Image: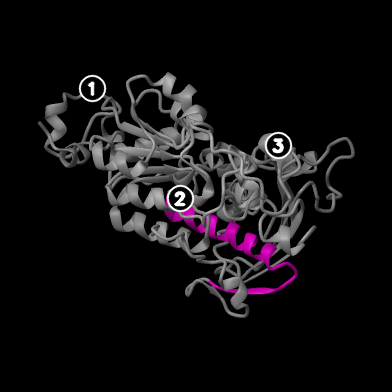
């Protein structure tokens, strides 16, 4: 019988190299390659919400394990994969089940990092929902660990695998709107959008209802400081809470800011400032505000000029561009990219519905050749391809090297929100603010006793 390690090496195959023919497995096994028909053994951790959707898109692989701290919430997913082994504790899963090749992590934000790190330490490829982590320190640590362990990774900002985001970068590189010095991006969250409709702006819940029998509350809390169970936190409503979620910017910024971050090669900001609605001590220490404006300043990058990026949430909007036709509305979530020769407008995920405005400019634009490689299939398919190619293969489109930097940028904005109306100067090399020690405390807050990264 082959050991799990041997199997993982066997799965370090270049699917692309064999995509055009059927090759007997024994012919290529000696080179460490595998045909694309070789299935990965995938485990899901946090499978009641987005994790279930991610798993459905891996239907051609083997779903061998499912792990969730709330078995009632996860029950429909358990039913969909009757052959998968069921776990409550991801640590037990990794200890007992050695045949896992890759994991999909879709737990609340505050547990992303500890689970991801344990998975990579075990040599597993990782697909983790966005934002990659709950804190800036975690994002940097996970990014560095992914390089160290040599696993293939993907953050779940699915728009980064889209056609539109590649078009946007190609058009900007082509000079379609000239040099870009200003970006405005917005979302209707937290006021709008599914689970955000119950967004809580309140102090810590004082009632102590019974913990549901299906829920392991201690594991749900993970590294977060202990508090008593309340349905204000689980399921779904955790995004509002500072200890568990990352607010509208952490949730949607990894989608909406992604195109500008990539196309403009923004990197780390040098200054961040935020204005918000409510900020009373009992509330502001617990939940994010209903509306915010976050202002980032990015330095020049080579020949690219400095960029001012402004983020709006809670249905706040930027000034309407005069180039936008009178009969057209701004999307509920999206961005305006302002160059010295024109403007672009796009929607939420991956620069959806990208166009130069006004329409007559779009029609007149001579589009350049497509030079950026396209993703075949879904965001999950791209991760699966990378896993099968192995350590030396082409990384997935939003590997942790990219997704970690994007997450850091978004989470710095959340720190600015908590430090309302203060100019924060950021030193990305040393991972600290140079002018505010209170803000530095938000970069790497302590874990609950018994938990480490």
Coordinates of residue 51 in the picture (x, y in percent):
48, 34
Residue positioned 55% across, 43% down in the render:
166
Mark 2–mark 3 Cα distance, whole angstroms, equals 27 Å
Q: CA distance from mark 1 to mark 2?
A: 46 Å
Which residue is labeled 2 in the image?
A: 222
Mark 3, residue position: 193
Q: Is residue 401 on the magenta stretch? A: yes
Depicted 217 relative to depicted 292: above or below: above
Give, as a single range, the part of the protein colored magenta.
Answer: 400-427
The residue sitting at 49% across, 32% down in the picture is 213
Label 1 sits on residue? 22
Q: Are marks 1 and 3 in contact (CB under 8 Å)?
A: no
Residue drawn at x 46%, y 39% as measured from the top left: 216
Mark 2 or mark 3: whose residue is earlier in sequence: 3
Q: Quadrant of the N terminus?
A: top left
| Residue 1 visible, this angle | yes
**Residue at the image position 62 percent from the left and 80 percent from the top:** 435
Quarter occupied by the C terminus: bottom left
Question: Is 103 displayed left or right of 244 in the figure?
Answer: left
Q: Is residue 262 magenta?
A: no
Task: Tell me if residue 447 comes above or below residue 366 in the rendering.
Answer: below
Residue 41, quarter of picture? top left
**SS assignment for the magenta stretch, majority:** helix
Q: Residue 222: x, y in percent?
A: 45, 50
Mark 2 Cα shell of 10 Å, populated few (<14), some (14-19), many (≥20)? many
Give the SS element for disc 2.
loop
Q: In the visual, does 361 lie left or right of 122?
A: right
First along the sequence among labels 1 and 3? 1
């Amino acid at each position: 019988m082959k050991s799990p390690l041997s199997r993982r090496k066997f799965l370090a195959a270049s699917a692309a190299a064999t995509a055009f023919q059927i090759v007997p497995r024994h012919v290529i096994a000696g080179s460490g390659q595998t045909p694309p028909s070789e299935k990965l053994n995938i485990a899901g951790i946090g499978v009641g919400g987005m994790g279930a959707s991610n798993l459905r898109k891996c239907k051609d692989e083997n779903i061998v394990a499912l792990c969730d701290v709330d078995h009632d919430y996860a029950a429909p997913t358990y039913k969909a994969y009757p052959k998968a082994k069921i776990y409550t504790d991801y640590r037990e899963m990794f200890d007992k089940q050695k045949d896992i090749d890759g994991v999909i992590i879709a737990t609340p934000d505050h547990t992303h990092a500890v689970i991801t790190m344990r998975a990579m330490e075990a040599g597993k490829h990782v697909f983790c929902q966005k934002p990659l982590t709950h804190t800036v320190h975690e994002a940097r640590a996970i990014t560095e660990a992914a390089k160290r362990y040599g696993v293939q990774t993907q953050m779940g900002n699915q728009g980064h695998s889209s056609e539109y985001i590649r078009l946007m970068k190609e058009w900007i590189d082509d000079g379609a709107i000239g040099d870009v010095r200003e970006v405005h991006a917005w979302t209707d969250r937290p006021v709008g959008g599914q689970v955000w409709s119950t967004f809580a702006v309140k102090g810590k819940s004082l009632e102590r209802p019974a913990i549901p029998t299906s829920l392991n509350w201690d594991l749900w809390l993970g590294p977060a400081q202990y508090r008593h169970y309340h349905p204000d936190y689980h399921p779904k409503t955790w995004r509002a809470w500072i200890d568990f979620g990352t607010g509208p910017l952490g949730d949607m910024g990894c989608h909406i800011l992604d195109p500008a971050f990539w196309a403009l090669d923004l990197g780390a900001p040098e200054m961040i400032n935020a204005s918000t609605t409510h900020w009373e001590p009992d509330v502001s220490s617990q939940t994010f505000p209903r509306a915010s404006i976050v202002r980032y300043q990015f330095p020049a990058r080579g020949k690219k000029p400095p960029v001012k990026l402004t983020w709006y949430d809670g249905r706040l909007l930027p000034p309407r561009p005069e180039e936008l036709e009178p009969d057209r509305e701004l999307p509920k979530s999206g961005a305006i990219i302002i160059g010295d020769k024109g403007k672009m407008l796009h929607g939420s995920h991956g620069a959806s519905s990208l166009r130069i405005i006004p329409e007559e400019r779009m029609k007149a634009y001579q589009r350049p050749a497509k030079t950026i490689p396209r993703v075949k299939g879904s965001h999950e398919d791209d991760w699966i391809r990378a896993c099968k190619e192995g350590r030396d293969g082409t990384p997935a489109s939003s590997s942790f090297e990219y997704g970690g930097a994007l997450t850091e940028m978004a989470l710095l904005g959340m720190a600015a929100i908590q430090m309302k109306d203060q100019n924060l100067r950021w030193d990305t090399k040393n991972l600290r603010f140079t002018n505010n020690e209170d803000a530095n405390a938000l970069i790497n807050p302590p874990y609950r006793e018994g938990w480490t990264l």
